[in-house]
Image: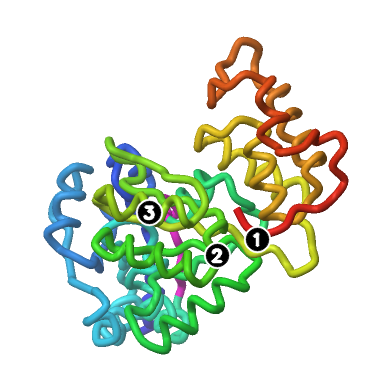
Amino acid sequence: MSSPAPGSLVVVATPIGNLGDLAPRAVAEMGRADLICCEDTRRTGRLLAHAGVAGARLRRVDAHTEDGAAADVVTRIAEGQRVALVTDAGTPGVSDPGSALVRAVIGAGLPVTTVPGPVAAVAALVLSGFDTARFVVDGFLPRRGVDRSARLAELAAERRTTVLYEAPSRAARTLADLRDACGAGRAVAVARELTKLHEEVWRGPLAEVAARAVTEDLRGEVVVVLAGAVAAGAAGGDGDVRAALRAARARGLAPGRAAAEVAAALGRPRREVYALALSDDADRPPGSPRSDGDDASDDGAAMGDDPADDTSGGGGSW
């Protein structure tokens, strides 16, 4: 008698907040699975009820049980069963359980496929306004000690955009540590409650955002997006300048003030940055409101000098 054809492990992304983001194929795969491995059976049970999936067999596979479950899952797949893997929210394996199970199935030479979908890190990244061409997801920082200090030092020198996850109760401390390690002027975006009713993104220099986190509660899931460091002696490109200008303008700064800060942070001549700021304003739809409400006549004064006469690079930090 020939052995049965192997089944497969299906990695299924689930909503990070808004149930409307649950993909039809995700519902179909969970409905046809012989077993659903999940981080929390109660939470996944509620998701299945919302999706109209009844009779599913659930098994808890979280950070504490993943390694122990791997052998049984591999056996089931080898016997022809179809196993779905989900976590509480988002894509399994991205700062959530799942990667060890995936490695075990691949190591056994068995099929793994995916139903792609929401990832909190990517959602926060695109909302930050920072460079998305090169980025790294660094997950949660170590809680304390030498490991935390070493990771913060790495982030201070990291030139790619970095995405971090953090618990709301620890967000203020982490932002203060990032400010101390990376400099008060390093740009950051903090996203919370992504895709939910109270979705919010704070953007600005670390000094400002860290101070805000002390006085305002951060509730729900928090994602921190840190702009990349600028190499010593190297000026940021136009893309970096425009991203930094957008963040500064979102804080309510007039073009002149925004240009002065960005020039200092990225080491570009103020007149060049000011020209890009005016260019961005010119590209706005006719009649659209200015974010700052200042008169254009104030912009040159905000620079400290006439930007047309300034050919020096920026210095210091913003």
The structure residue drawn at horizontal position 67% and vertical position 20%, both measured from the top left corner, is: 296
Q: Is residue 270 magenta?
A: no
Residue under label 3: 211
**Residue at x-position 67% and y-position 59%:** 316
Q: Position of residue 245 (x, y in %)?
A: 64, 41
Q: Is residue 116 left or right of residue 182?
A: left
Q: Position of residue 73 (x, y in %)?
A: 29, 79
Location of mark 2 (residue): 183
Percent x, y for residue 315?
A: 72, 57
Per the model, the C-alpha gap separating discs 2 and 1 is 21 Å
237 above or below 65?
above
**As displayed, is residue 217 above or below residue 68?**
above
Q: Which mark is residue 134?
A: 1
Q: Give residue 95's quadrant in the image.
A: bottom left
Residue 29 in sight here:
no
Mark 2 residue type: Gly
Q: Position of residue 28 (x, y in %)?
A: 32, 48
- What element does badge 1 sit on? loop
Identify the amino acid type marked 1: Arg
